């Protein structure tokens, strides 16, 4: 960039003069220099006349829309970051925006803090450049939603801490990806990251895997073996499905956490270790503690900090970005979704979360003969739930519709209750009553 972030020159392009005036005032109050254009041709003339560090353009404009303007900018101003603005309810446009080289997109009404974050990250080179189509990416966590932004901020706040972390969330939400992001954002990032699923092997094998063993410790132990706790020294050990660990092994793990030493099975020597433990479970560990299925003292040792991953239903804004990323990887960039197919993905309830979304995209790739994945193909790939085919009473159908509607409105407005109430054409007090009725937290 030709300038530092403080004092960088921005170009706002929108045929809504009142909006550009308001946004320009906000940005100038934060130290940016702002030029304004109300047409695409006017924006190109400004780019010819003066150095610009970043362009923010509306999508729908007369004569030249945002996509066409971005195409001209990419042609003559290589590397210029361009951010797209679009009205709420146009989330599928984001897929096209990412594929055509926009660094990010903002939904109207514009949230000031989100706008500043997007601009600062783009100017600092922290988001994808104009030549890439990756969505917002924090150490492998792909997101655009407010719910995930809060999770990332929590991880960033833990960067300088060595505290053990317990990750909770539904199956398929991406616990291991989150654990890896925690590791890469931490002071242990240069050390090893090792993951093990505690529910995927018998107890005697799990003990050997975790703590290692000495030759002759049991039948089949033909040589010494270093355990994963020791192998993770200086880094992070991710214990997935910790709730499935047998109680007798929980006692041994607790000792490692307390003493910061590990003794291999059949060994006499203690080995010092410096390991950050990140654990995860789809089970409610507190309930398991109450039912005497999980040790309370171990729970508090592992749960120094708790991280909750939102379900895919709680981060609807991320579906187009995730689906587009999966599609690009699975088809080598040869296929794309149309907007109607994205709408179908947004309307599904995703009990299997991100893992299920990946499987559905893979299914779509397999059954699509051409380049365009249509809504018919997505509908064939999505499972036909028995519950959807069962007859539902009118009151329950109304309740479910109301709940799903509120969730979608909140997702489109990024959790802003005032904007969601306006979009739903309700006053704010009525909308809060609906939130309370359905036990929806914002």
Image: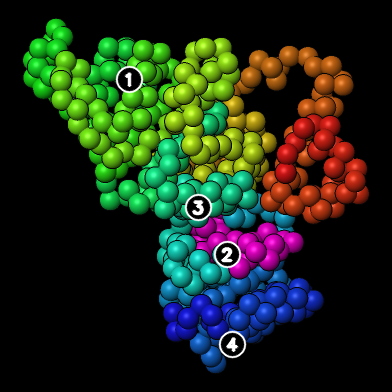
- Residue 117: assigned label: 2
- Residue 46: assigned label: 4
Q: Which of marks 4 and 1 is nearer the N terminus?
A: 4
Residue indicated by mark 1 = 252
- Label 1: state its secondary structure: helix
Q: In which quarter of the image is the C terminus?
A: top right
The location of residue 181, given as percent across then percent down, is 42, 46
Answer with the quarter of the image where residue 261 lies: top left
User: Callout 1 environment at 10 Å: few (<14), some (14 to 19), or many (20+)?
Assistant: some
Q: Which of marks 4 and 1 is in front?
A: 1
At a point 64% along the width and 36% down the height, the residue shown is 313
In the foreground, 418 or 219: 219
Answer with the quarter of the image where residue 344 lies: top right
**Left or right: where 28 falls relative to 369:** right
Distance, label 3 to label 1, CA atoms, is 30 Å
Q: In which quarter of the image is the N terminus?
A: bottom left
At a point 46% along the width and 70% down the height, the residue shown is 124
In the foreground, 293 or 268: 268
Residue indicated by mark 3 = 157
Looking at the image, how many numbered discs can be counted on the residues?
4
Q: Is 243 above or below relative to 433?
A: above
Q: What stretch is highlighted in magenta?
A: 95-117
Distance, label 4 to label 3, CA atoms, is 40 Å
């Amino acid at each position: 960039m030709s300038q530092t972030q403080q004092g960088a020159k921005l170009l706002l392009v929108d045929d809504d003069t009142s909006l550009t005036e308001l946004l320009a005032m906000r940005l100038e109050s934060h130290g940016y220099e702002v030029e304004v254009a109300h047409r695409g041709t006017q924006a190109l003339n400004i780019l010819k006349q003066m150095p610009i560090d970043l362009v923010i353009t509306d999508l729908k404009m007369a004569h030249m829309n945002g996509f066409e303007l971005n195409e001209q900018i990419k042609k003559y101003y290589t590397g210029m970051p361009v951010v797209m603005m679009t009205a709420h309810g146009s989330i599928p446009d984001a897929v096209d925006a990412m594929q055509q080289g926009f660094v990010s997109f903002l939904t109207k009404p514009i949230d000031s803090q989100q706008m500043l974050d997007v601009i600062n990250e783009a100017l600092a080179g922290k988001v994808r450049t104009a030549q890439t189509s990756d969505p917002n990416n924090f150490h492998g966590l792909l997101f655009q939603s407010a719910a995930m932004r809060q999770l990332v901020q929590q991880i960033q706040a833990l960067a300088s801490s060595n505290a053990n972390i317990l990750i909770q969330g539904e199956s398929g939400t991406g616990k291991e990806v989150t654990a890896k992001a925690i590791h890469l954002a931490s002071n242990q990032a240069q050390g090893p990251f090792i993951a093990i699923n505690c529910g995927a092997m018998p107890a005697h094998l799990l003990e050997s895997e975790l703590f290692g063993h000495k030759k002759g410790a049991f039948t089949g132990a033909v040589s010494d073996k270093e355990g994963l706790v020791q192998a993770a020294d200086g880094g992070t050990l991710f214990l997935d499905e910790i709730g499935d660990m047998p109680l007798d092994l929980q006692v041994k793990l607790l000792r490692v956490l307390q003493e910061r030493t590990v003794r291999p099975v059949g060994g006499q020597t203690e080995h010092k270790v410096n390991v950050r433990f990140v654990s995860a479970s789809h089970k409610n560990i507190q309930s398991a503690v109450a039912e005497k299925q999980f040790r309370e003292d171990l729970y508090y040792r592992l749960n120094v900090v708790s991280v909750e991953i939102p379900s895919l239903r709680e981060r609807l804004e991320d579906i187009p970005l995730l689906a587009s990323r999966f599609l690009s990887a699975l088809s080598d960039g040869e296929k794309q979704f149309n907007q109607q197919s994205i709408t179908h993905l947004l309307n599904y309830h995703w009990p299997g979360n991100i893992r299920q979304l990946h499987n559905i995209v893979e299914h779509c790739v397999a059954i699509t003969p051409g380049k365009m994945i249509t809504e018919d193909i997505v509908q064939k790939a999505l499972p036909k739930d028995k519950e959807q085919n069962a007859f539902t009473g009118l009151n329950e159908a109304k309740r479910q519709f109301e709940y799903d509607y509120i969730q979608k409105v909140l997702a489109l407005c990024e959790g802003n209750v005032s904007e969601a109430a306006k979009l739903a054409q309700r006053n704010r007090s009525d909308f809060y009553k609906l939130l309370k009725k359905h036990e929806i937290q914002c």
